[in-house]
Image (spheres, coloured by chain):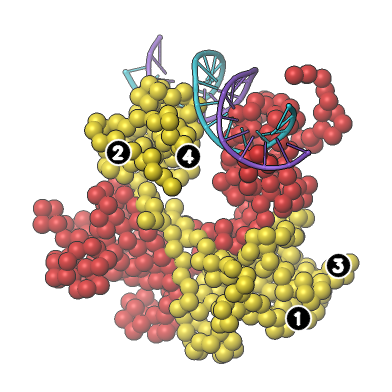
Chain colours: A yellow, B red, C purple, D cyan
DNA sequence: AAGTGGTCTAGACCACTAT
DNA sequence: TAGTGGTCTAGACCACTTT
């Protein structure tokens, strides 16, 4: 698909290929990244100034600016007004893990199934009340689900939902709520966003039984709070997944997965 | 174009404040985000076209474009050429976890200490050879470190490094290698980047002993490979951290931590 | 005063999609 | 044909830092 990757073998500088399908600012990002990755500019070094880059690569200031901005929020460089643009050193704190693996586990809805284990209206105890910002004793919905991949149970999900008497939730809907649209990505959900937290844990008896694992086996617990469009916490819950079934990957610095 | 005020009818509820220290494109990002978060535009809805946004907020196409681009890589919208810009539904797969917690654990170098437990030159077995892309039997450096926070052991680190006879590593250097500059963020490292993977595990006897935990206690294993500027894998290793000492957080969708 | 990053304008052209 | 996103130009102004 990318057959016009030309070798610009000689000279320290590559140049912008105007005939390429790749826009100049993308090419410039690539050129600068390669120069950094090749060690031409090391951590702490200053990059050429923006006017210099303009004349070096024959592009307008705006195009240089776009490229720099991209490097900036890729974390490759830092800029300080009046001084210059500098190559950023590796910092572990900037590393991130993606949840893509979790989504992959549940992609392809044909291979995925949800079994609703339990659904009941409960009275919020102190813990639930605090998480959902309601009063103790108020109603909430408690759900337990088991998610299958190719017939194998892979995720155990427990969730507390705001109870809204004006909008009762149908059973069929509950299988989808916060899964459809969250996992598959299609169909709008009623949530505007949420916060996540991942913990290391071990399977308890029930969880081991449901997930076909052994008691005390290492596992991930993924805790979520989703908020509705009125900023109310509308869902609090957690997924349990066997540690030998999933792990989460990410990259650091200029490294791109190959 | 007509500069008549045809925006009186269904005008924007917010407008760009030219006197603000916040540049117009940032304000526009905020305005659109708030409208989405408030439910004015729901998942799947189409945003006003870029020319419409230009006249709505009296900014140039380039400014609108910058705002849209930001929303785009914030994951808030998706764009399809020829059709429009659409609000993106929540997708769990887009969630990310930050390693900030890990960096925080080791911030403030005054409270942090590194104890080198072991350092020896070894012959690479099959596993090490594969990870470092060297031949079996070749030399490599094996390190074991214990990292303390306020006197408490918090991280156990094992690492295999490329052995370079031309550049022997001093002991003092080893305490810093891949920690200084990776954690503290100052001082350039010799690595251009790396890949990370996080696993759920349980403490083994040695690890429990070192970290002051109990055997089989839940824990995280953070595996890393760092690459040098010649794209060689120069460091392979992993950190062990008690599960009750750390967890990793992140957000999803339009939610911002408050 | 000169250089640097940061921002913005007011158009232009292109490729794509729908009618 | 008209509308849409995507890109680009060739300047301009500002705030900041260094000399």
Write down the chain letter for disc 1: A
Q: Residue at x 62, y 65 (%)?
A: A183
CA gap, disc 1 and disc 3: 16 Å
Badge number at residue A7: 2
Is residue B131 visible in the rendered image? The answer is yes
- Residue lying at the far left in this picture: please name it: B165
Q: Residue at x 20, y 60 (%)?
A: B162
CA gap, disc 1 and disc 4: 47 Å
CA gap, disc 2 and disc 1: 61 Å
Compared across the picture, whether A241 is left or right of A83 comes to right
Would you name the residue on which mark 4 appears?
Answer: A70
Number of dots carrying numbers: 4
- Residue lying at the far right in this picture: please name it: A166
Write down the chain letter for disc 4: A
Would you name the residue on which mark 1 appears?
Answer: A119
Mark 2: give few (<14), some (14-19) or many (20+) Cα within 10 Å.
few
Q: Of the residues under marks 3 and 2, which one precedes in the sequence?
A: 2
Q: What percent of the width, then of the height, locates residue B58?
A: 71, 26
User: Disc 3 vs disc 2: which is toward the camera?
Assistant: 2
Q: Are marks 4 and 3 on the same chain?
A: yes
Q: Of the residues under marks 2 and 1, which one precedes in the sequence?
A: 2
């Amino acid at each position: 698909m990318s057959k016009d990757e030309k070798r610009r073998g000689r000279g320290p500088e590559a140049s912008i290929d105007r005939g390429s399908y790749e826009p100049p600012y993308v090419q410039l990002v690539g050129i600068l990244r390669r120069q950094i990755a090749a060690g031409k500019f090391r951590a702490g070094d200053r990059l050429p100034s923006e006017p210099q880059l303009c004349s070096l690569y024959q592009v307008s200031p705006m195009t240089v600016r776009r490229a720099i901005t991209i490097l900036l929020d890729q974390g490759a460089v830092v800029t300080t007004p009046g001084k210059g643009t500098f190559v950023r050193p590796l910092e572990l704190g900037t590393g991130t893990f993606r949840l893509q693996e979790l989504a992959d586990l549940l992609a392809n809805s044909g291979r995925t199934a949800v079994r609703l284990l339990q659904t009941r209206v409960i009275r919020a105890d102190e813990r639930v009340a605090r998480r959902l910002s309601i009063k103790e004793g108020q109603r909430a919905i408690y759900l337990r689900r088991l998610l299958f991949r190719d017939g194998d149970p892979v995720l155990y999900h427990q969730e507390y939902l705001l109870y809204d008497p004006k909008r009762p939730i149908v059973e069929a809907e509950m299988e989808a709520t916060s899964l459809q649209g969250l996992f598959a990505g299609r169909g709008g959900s009623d949530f505007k966003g949420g916060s996540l937290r991942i913990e290391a844990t071990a399977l308890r008896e029930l969880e081991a039984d449901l997930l076909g694992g052994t008691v005390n086996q290492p596992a991930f617990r993924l805790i979520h709070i989703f908020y509705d469009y009125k900023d109310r916490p509308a869902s609090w819950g957690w997924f349990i997944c066997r540690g030998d079934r999933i792990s989460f990957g990410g990259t650091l610095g200029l490294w791109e997965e190959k």
